[in-house]
Image (cartoon, rainbow, N blue to C red):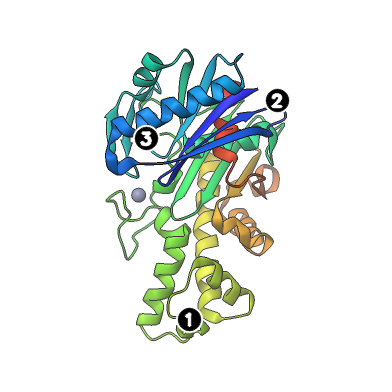
Amino acid sequence: MGIGIDIGGTAIKGGIVDHLGVIQKERMVITQSQLGYDQVLNDLVLLIKELQQLSPTETAVGIGIPGILSGAGETVVSCPNLNWQNRPLKQDLERELTLEVLLVNDATAACIAEAAFGSTRGRSSSVMLTLGTGVGGGVIINDRVISGAHGVASEVGHMIMEENFYNCNCGKNGCLETFASATALIRYCQKQLAEGVESDLQADGDFDARRIFEAAKAGDSLALTAVNRLARYLGWAIANISDLVDPEIFCIGGGLSEAGDFLLERIRAETKCRLTYPRFAMPEIVLATFRNEAGMIGAANLGRFN
Ligand SMILES: [Zn+2]
């Protein structure tokens, strides 16, 4: 068993996770980040204490954070969703709790959940890409999470691909996230429509990524171009990551992964084209197993890949 917490922009979820990766008990509070760090800290302490009462033998709690952690995993260096900067969260929580507190980036937590119980289970080297409003990543090589000297080693969403027509939220131009997220897909289609490209999407006014995939599957030329473009950049990124750390398997999660094989087949083809050793070092590329619970399950199992 283990206690895992997933801090999101709208809710903080906590769960007691059993040895098979199943959440046995779950609690949730609203993230009141607008009331400041101390309020969220207080809510976190109460949530963790409640879970601890439900499972009194626990000695540690793992917490997934949607931001950058210090290399030692003690400080939240930056978490734009919660408006936190340089917050010593581990120390602040351990002062109030009788548990050891372990912090992890939420995308890394999801990667750990997949490696422990999901689609990459049993593989010692795996990479997870989470395709949502942004692109998150987690990297496990030889059964160890790669976090790097400054804690930012798995920021695959901000790898530079090439110049793009808009800047990333991080302030740079050319990040993978601006080519391969739901936001990227929508912005590309909007731009093409504004330039006069004909498409079924025009009639929809506001459209989301799911609608773009539907239109692409139905043969809409713009939507298909947009999906192929996204898959191309993901293939490049996967080939680059493969050349660097050579994982056995990649798993694709996040909202865009709902597109399933329609997306995966394209990513596989693009990866193969760009890989240096496609004949013997082509990684498997599969869909993630877990959805919203991944953060909690991974956070409760941090010890497995440290
Ligand atoms: Zn970026």
Residue 110 lies, with reference to residue 134, above or below; the image says above
Per the image, label 3 sits on a secondary structure element best described as strand
> What percent of the width, then of the height, locates residue 18?
68, 27
Q: Amino acid at mark 2?
A: His
Q: Nearer the viewer, mark 2 or mark 3?
A: 2
Q: Amino acid at mark 1?
A: Asp
Q: Residues within 10 Å of mark 1 (few under 14, many from 20)?
A: few
**Quadrant occupied by the N terminus:** top right
> What percent of the width, then of the height, locates residue 51?
55, 25
Residue at the spot 70% in from the left edge and 43% down from the top edge: 280
Instruction: Give the residue pinned by disc 2.
Output: 19
Residue at the spot 60% in from the left edge and 73% down from the top edge: 214
Report the Cα–Cα distance between label 2 and label 3: 28 Å
Q: Nearer the viewer, residue 19 or 246?
A: 19
Q: Quadrant of residue 184?
A: bottom left
Query: Residue 288's mark?
Result: none
Q: Nearer the viewer, residue 52 or 20?
A: 52
> What percent of the width, then of the height, locates residue 77?
31, 31
Earlier in the chain: of badge 2 and badge 1, it is 2
- Residue 128 left/right relative to 284: left
Badge 2 vs badge 1, beta-carbon distance below 8 Å:
no
Report the Cα–Cα distance between label 2 and label 1: 46 Å
Per the image, label 1 sits on a secondary structure element best described as helix
Q: Quadrant of residue 265?
A: bottom right
Instruction: Give the residue pinned by disc 1.
Output: 204
Q: Is residue 246 visible?
A: no
